Amino acid sequence: MITDVLGAPTDGDGVVPDAVKVVRSLTRLVKIDFWLRNPDYLAHELLTEIEQGRQPPGDTLRLIANMIGGTAPSLHRYPMAKYLYGAYERPDNALALLASRKHLRMLRVNESSANARKDYYLLPKGQAAATVMREEVRQMQWYVRQAQAIGLIPEAVSGGRMRRRQYEHPGYEAAANGRLIPEITEEVTKRAEDVATWHGLPWPPISPPSSAVGGLQA
């Protein structure tokens, strides 16, 4: 879902000829994964987007309510540990599984330079599998909306910018190296109530979120 929803079109760049989308850099992949797996922190960022006038309060509050409760799947929060430069978990096993099925291909770029990175290319077979999952597994729509919501945050285009923004939360910054980053659902719920009150809106919202986020169809 990360590579399908948030990957950039390859536009036939020829690097991986049959690829359809790409997520450039391990840092961006992991920082997106943190927000996808920790909806309380993603909700915190979306509340900031409302406060700074970049997202409409009504639709965004409904989206937030779905993230931190409501119709969220039972496994809707999967914590990550803090390691040196923020949230991190080795993605090797998951990526190896996708690569073995020819859903994704990893490519090392500029190996001989100080700016070496890994790029992650979504292949046609992987995109087809993602489409089937969206259509046949109802719970996947929640994760699709999570990924779309990450795309509403300006910093989501860059791993380094996401890392800096994630460190702006005191609980995230204070987490000990090697320990799980603490849950902030209670804090975010109270903040959402305050934001809703400020805008004269009910909390929790009355109507469910739509299947589209920021103009993107789920």
Image (cartoon, grey):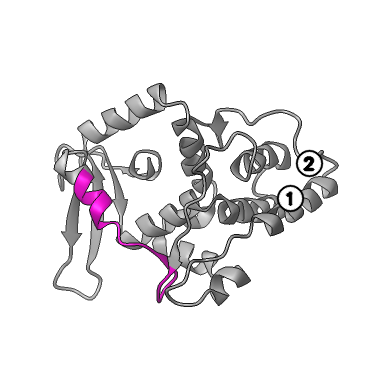
- Horizontally, is 50 left or right of 23 in the view? right
User: SS of the residue at dot 2?
Assistant: loop
Q: What range is drawn magenta here?
A: 82-97
Q: Reply above or below: 55 against 109.
A: above
Mark number displayed over residue 203: 2
Residue 203: quarter of image? top right
Residue 158: % across, % down: 41, 59
User: SS of the residue at dot 1?
Assistant: helix
Residue 54: % across, % down: 65, 49
State the quadrant of the N terminus. Answer: top left
Residue 52 visible here: no
- Horizontally, is 154 left or right of 1 in the view? right
Residue shown at 84% from the left, 49% from the top: 198
User: Where is mark 1, residue-wise?
Assistant: 192
- Number of residues whose C-alpha sits closer than 10 Å to that of mark 1, classed few (under 14), some (14–19) or many (20 or more): many
Residue 178: % across, % down: 42, 74
Mark found first going from the N terminus, 2 or 1? 1
